[in-house]
Amino acid sequence: MKAIQTSMLSFMQQPKQQFMIPVYQRTYKWTRLNCKQLLDDILRVSKYENRTHFIGSIVYITDEYYQATKINQLSIIDGQQRITTISLLLLAMCKYLKENPNNFDTIPEELFNEYLINNTYRNKYENEFIKLDLLHCI
């Protein structure tokens, strides 16, 4: 086992990677209270110069020796609730930025392309296009 320290956004930003939620993981169960706590943590840490906050570990497995696709598929073992919630938050931010383009420097398409999709595979491989694959939950 190898532990690597990185920020959640840096982890999610990696190109050619897809987060797979295995069928044996529990379905999404976070309530408003859980989401509010995460958002409060994000807002609180954004006020400080050192803008880092430990929100928990993401544990995953990958077959680094054999990949049938060009995407590095990570089976999320722990952290699926957080990664799903942050993906939903990023999607909501994209929508808000699109509706309010003059209020921010960030372009919604850049945010969307950077964190939520594998833009390189948009027209090539439909199943590798989205970074978070929840279909393995069904």
Image (cartoon, rainbow, N blue to C red):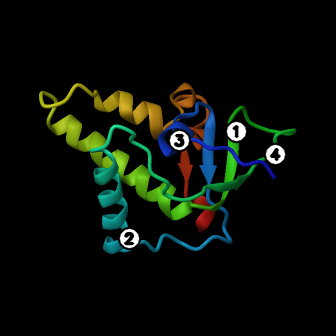
Vertical comparison of 49 with 85: above or below: above
| Contact? badges 3 and 1 (CB < 8 Å) | no
Q: Earlier in the sequence, mark 1 or mark 4?
A: 4
Q: Amino acid at mark 4?
A: Asp
Q: Residue at x 71, y 32 (%)?
A: 70
Q: Look at the numbered disc 4 and give the secondary structure of its residue.
A: loop
Disc 1 crowd rating (10 Å Cα; few below 14, some 14-19, many 20+) is some
Q: Earlier in the sequence, mark 3 or mark 1?
A: 3
Q: Residue at x 53, y 41 (%)?
A: 12
Q: Marks 1 and 4, Cα distance to the nearest angstrom? A: 8 Å
Which residue in the structure is indicated by mark 2?
A: 34
Q: Earlier in the sequence, mark 2 or mark 3?
A: 3
Check residue 12 in the rendering and tell me which mark sits there, or answer none.
3
Residue 138: quadrant of the picture: bottom right
Check residue 63 in the rendering and tell me which mark sits there, or answer none.
4
Q: Marks 3 and 4, Cα distance to the nearest angstrom? A: 18 Å
The reply, left or right, for residue 70 in relation to residue 104 is right
Q: Marks 2 and 3, Cα distance to the nearest angstrom? A: 20 Å
Q: Earlier in the sequence, mark 3 or mark 4?
A: 3
Residue 40: quadrant of the picture: bottom left
Where is residue 96 drawn, in percent x and y? 21, 43
Q: Look at the numbered disc 1 and give the secondary structure of its residue.
A: strand
Residue 90: quadrant of the picture: top left
Disc 3 crowd rating (10 Å Cα; few below 14, some 14-19, many 20+) is many
Check residue 72 in the rendering and tell me which mark sits there, or answer none.
1
Q: Nearer the viewer, mark 2 or mark 1?
A: 2
The reply, left or right, for residue 105 in relation to residue 14 is left
Most extreme residue toward the right is 65
Q: Nearer the viewer, mark 3 or mark 1?
A: 3
Vertical comparison of 84 with 9: above or below: below
